[in-house]
Amino acid sequence: MKSRRWWFVVGVAAWLLAACSSGSGTSRGSSGAVSTTRVRDQATSTTVPAANATSTTAVAATGGARWTTYDGDAARSGVAADGPASANATRMQWASAALDGEVYAQPLLVGDRVVIATENDSVYLLDSSDGTEVWKAHVGEAVSGSSLPCGNVDPVGITGTPVVDAKGGRIYVVGMVAPGRHMLFELDLSTGHVLASVRVDAAGADPLVHNQRGALTLAGGQVFVPYGGRYGDCGDYHGQVVAVSVAGAELGPVASYTLPTQGEGGFWAPPGAVVASDGTLFLTSGNSSSSGAYDDGNSVVHLSADLKLLDTFAPSNWAALNARDADLGSTSPVLLPGNRVFQIGKTGTGYLLDEGSLGGIGGQLHAASVCDSSAFGGVAHDGNTLYVPCSDGIVEVSVTSDTFSVGWNSPMSTPGPTIVAGDAVWTVATGSGDLVAVDRSSGATLSSQHIGAAPSRFTSPAAGSGRVVVGAGRRVIAFGS
C-alpha cells in the first residue's frame, strides 16, 4: 500500500501540471522464422499496430538533452554534463499522469522530450518541461506472467531500455508480444508511428524462457539485443545477442550469437552491451549450469561487431560461482582509459582486466573486495573513478594503471544503478523508495527525495537539461532547480 507521503507528492504534482495504411512488406508467420513489416504511410497497418499519436510536433535533432541510450552513451558512462548543477538545490518539478504499465526501462532524454517505455508494450513521448504526453504508441499485446514458466514481471512487455537515433529521428524498442515472441519496433520519433518491425528471437531459442532485460545498443548501423533467463532460471536458455541491421530501407538482416554454455549463462545486466572505441562489444554472462568443463558462463565476453567471439575472462573460481548462483554478470563491464576493463558481480569482488587481452580463466590484472555484499545494475564512471552500487550502499573505486583502490562508502538501502550529474552521484534507493544524491568527493548525502515504490532494484534515473528524470512505478518524475 502506498504511503500518504507518496499520494501527497502525486497530488501536488497533478496540481502543478498544466492542462495541458495499409502496410506493405514481408511476413513469414509466427512459427519462429523472422517476420518483417514496414508501414509506408501513416494509416493503420493490419500487421503492426500503428501508434495512437496525438501530436506531430517534430523533435529537434540538435540542442537540449542528449541521453539517447542507457547511461547516456555507448560506453555506458552514466555521466551527464548538463544535469542539475547542485543536488541540494533540486526539487520535484513535475510528475506525469499515470502510464498504462510499470516502468522498468531507464528514461531517455532527447532535446525537450522524454522517451519512456512500459511493461504494457507502450512507448510514450513526454514534454520534459511539464511531463505532459506528446504521443503514445501501443505496439502490441503484452504477455501475461501467468502464461510463462517462471519470472517475476507481470505482464511482460518492454523491459529493456530502448535506444534513440536522434539524427535519423527513430526509436528502437523490443517488446515481448502475445502469444510469446520478441519484436523489434522502429518508431518515428516525431509522431510515434510504427515504421517497421522484425522478430528478434534467436534461431532455435524459446522466447518463453529467454528474457530481454538488458538495454538495446545502437552502433555501426546495427541494434544489438541481449537476452538472459527469467527469474527462477527455468527452461533451456543461454546468453544470446541478436544483431539487426537498421541502416537500410528495411530492418534486417538478423544475426545472433549464442554463448556455448551447457545451459544458462544469460546476458541480463540492465546496461546491455558496452561498445569499445573500435566498435566491438563487451558483455558479462551470469552463472551457467556446468560443474565440470568451462563453458563461458560467469565470464566477461568480447565480441566483434559481427558477433564473433574474440576473447573471454572468468574468475578462477567460476565453477564455485556457478554452484552458488553468484553471477559475475549482475553488472555490465566498465571500459576505462588506458585499455582497462572493470567487472564486479554478486560476490562483491572487483576485477581489473586488460581490454586487449582479457586473460582467460584467472588472468585478471588485479582483484579485490569492493562490496561487503553484492553489486547489481550499472556502474557509472567518470574517467578512472567508478561509483559501484553495492546492495548496502554506493562505493567509490579509483583505478590506477594495473590496480584499483576503494574510497568512500555511502550506506543506503539497496541502491540501483548509479549516474553522475553535476556535483553528485544519483541513484534510486529501492529499499526506501527515494531518489538519493551523494557528494562525488565524499559520499555525503546531499538530497533524498521520496518517489514511491520502484518496480525493481534496477530502477535508474537519467539526466539532462538541468533535470534528473526517473520512472517510479507507473509514473515519471522530474527533479531540477
Image (spheres, rainbow, N blue to C red):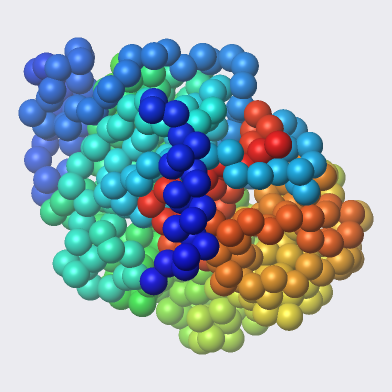
Image quadrant assignment for residue 430 = bottom right
Task: Please state the total of marks drawn on the protein image.
Answer: 0
Quarter occupied by residue 173: top left
x then y, percent, for residue 250: 29, 22
Q: Is residue 58 visible?
A: yes
Rendered position, 219 above or below 346? above
Query: Is 463 displayed left or right of 31 in the figure?
Result: right
Quadrant (top left, top right, bottom left, bottom right) of the N terminus = bottom left
Residue in view at x 19 percent, y 69 percent: 146
Residue 350 visible? The answer is: no
What residue is drawn where x is 46% and y is 34%? 17
Query: Which quarter of the image is occupied by the C terminus?
Result: top right
Determine the image quadrant of residue 262. bottom left
Q: Residue at x 59, y 33 (%)?
A: 67
Q: Is residue 292 above or below residue 428?
A: below
Q: In x, y percent, where is residue 164?
A: 47, 30
Q: Nearer the viewer, residue 307 or 463?
A: 463
Residue 396, percent from left and from top: 82, 62
Residue 26 at what x, y percent from top left?
Answer: 14, 26
- Between 68 and 122, the residue placed more toward the observer is 122
Say if 308 sits above or below 262 in the image.
Answer: above
Q: Nearer the viewer, residue 298 or 216?
A: 216
Query: Which residue lies at the image location 83% right of the left edge and 61% below the top edge?
Result: 443
Lateral position of residue 166 relative to residue 401, left or right: left
Q: Nearer the viewer, residue 343 or 215?
A: 215
